[in-house]
Amino acid sequence: QVQLVESGGGLVQAGGSLRLSCAASRSIFSINRMHWFRQAPGKQRELVATITSAGSTSYADSVKGRFTISRDNAKNTMYLQMNSLKPEDTAVYYCNTAISGSVYWGQGTQVTVSS
C-alpha cells in the first residue's frame, strides 16, 4: 500500500516551466513503474510519462522534448519537469502506480498555462 501526494502545480505563462513532485508514503525503490497522468476539463485522463525502476522513461508524443520524468528513490519522490509549457498543457496532473495488483492515485495538482 502507498499514499501519493502531488505538489508543484500553479499558474504559469506559456513558455514557462514548472516542476511537479509526487511524494510517496513508503519506499519506491522496489516499485517498477510510476506514471504521470493528466486530465483536462471535459477530456479523458491521459498518460503523460512513465519511469521504471531501472530509470527507463517514455513520454506521450505531445510532451516529448519538453517534459522530463525522474525519480529519487532516496527521497521516495517522483518528479515531472515541464518546460516550454503550452496552454494545452492545462490540466490536473496525477501520479500513479500499481503495487501487487492494486492501483494508487494521488489527489492531483492543478497546472494552468496562460496564453
Image (cartoon, grey):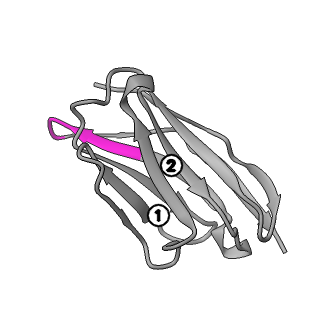
Residue at 60 percent across and 71 percent down: it is: 42
Residue at 77 percent across and 65 percent down: it is: 113
Amino acid tagged 1: Arg
Residue at 28 percent across and 25 percent down: it is: 1
Question: Looking at the image, is mark 2 or mark 1 nearer the viewer?
Answer: 2
Residue where numbered disc 2 is placed: 94
Disc 1 is placed on an element classified as: loop
Residue where numbered disc 1 is placed: 45
For this orientation, the residue located farthest to the bottom is 61
Magenta stretch in the rendered image: 96-101
Q: Is residue 73 above or below residue 65?
A: above
From the top left corner, tell me how far across and down residue 32 is, in percent: 22, 43
- Could you tell whether 59 is left or right of 86 in the image? left
Give the tally of numbered discs. Answer: 2
Disc 2 is placed on an element classified as: strand
Mark 1 Cα shell of 10 Å, populated few (<14), some (14-19), many (≥20): some
From the top left corner, tell me how far across and down residue 35 is, in percent: 38, 51
For the residue pair 53 and 109, the one nearer the viewer reads as 53
Cβ–Cβ under 8 Å for marks 2 and 1: yes
From the top left corner, tell me how far across and down residue 65 is, in percent: 52, 73
The quarter of the picture where residue 74 lies is top left
Mark 2 Cα shell of 10 Å, populated few (<14), some (14-19), many (≥20): many
Amino acid tagged 2: Tyr
Q: Is residue 34 above or below residue 25?
A: below
Q: Is residue 3 above or below residue 33?
A: above
Name the image quarter holding the C terminus. bottom right
